[in-house]
Image (tube, helix red, strand yellow):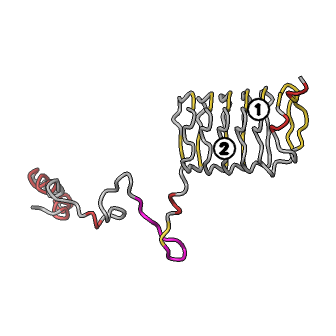
Amino acid sequence: MKTKEELKLYFENGDIPRQEAFWEWQNSYWHKDEKIDMTKIAGLENGLPRFNDFYTEIDETGNASLAHLSVKRVFIKAGTLSIPDMFLSNTGISEVSVPNSVTKIGKEAFSNNLIKSISLPAQVKTISESAFSNNQITTLSLSEGLKEIKSSAFSYNKISSLYIPSTVVMIGSKAFSNNPNLQYVRLERSTQYYADAFDAQTTVVGGTLISDM
């Protein structure tokens, strides 16, 4: 069999190689009948991973660590219209991306997780009961177009700054309760809210109390 270097010399010397020489050289690169040694492939030393297999990393002190598994990101497929009740409740997720197509987020859909930041697109009209309760949300972005924030939707979080879109017509009971760092909220007069929608330390300017109607 001619080597690649020998074939190269054909052209440098102005000779014309036989096509059989190319065939032999090409066939030498086919190893379909040979098994690949997994121990020589980085990350596959223990064979192909299975769904329930977890491999540790090493932290800065040399100890085994599973910290890399604590960040669970969820990307909801574009075109999704509604997030079901209890969709990812108590699953330990820390990040979620909601596409522009979603119009409703169901009850407790993302409750009891580790989410720190959430941005909801303009197509979302309704955030149902306890949808994001008991997370670690510090940054919340709500878009114009949102209509209703139901009871306990964002309770038990760490929200410190909040903008309520002018399109919101109803904020339910305890919707933002137990957010101890939330000091001030401004509402449009057309936004109705329950007295316990916010904690006592939160100053609410504007809006219309349900009891005043």
Comparing 2 with 61, the one in front is 61
Q: Which span of residues is magenta-colored?
A: 54-63
173 in relation to 12, above or below:
above
| Residue occupying the point 15% across, 63% down | 3
- Determine whether the residue tagged by mark 1 lies in a helix, strand or loop: loop
Residue on which the image places disc 2? 118
Q: Quadrant of residue 202?
A: top right
Element on which disc 2 rests: strand
Is 61 covered by the magenta stretch? yes
Predominant SS of the magenta segment: loop
In the rendered structure, the answer to whether residue 103 lies left or right of residue 40 reads right
Question: Dot 2, crowdedness within 10 Å: few (<14), some or many (≥20)?
Answer: some
Residue 7 falls in image quadrant = bottom left
User: Which label was assigned to residue 200?
Assistant: none
Place residue 193 in its image quadrant.
top right
Residue 62: image location, x then y, percent: 50, 76
Estimate the x, y position of residue 97 in percent, counting from the top left: 59, 41
Say which residue appears at 58% left-offset and 44% top-offset.
Answer: 96
Of residues 130 and 57, the one drawn nearer to the viewer in this rendering:
130
Judge from the rendering whether residue 199 lies leftward or rightward of residue 61; answer left or right. Answer: right
On the rendered image, what quadrant is the C terminus found in? top right
Dot 2 amino acid type: Ile
> On the image, numbered disc 1 is attached to which residue?
172
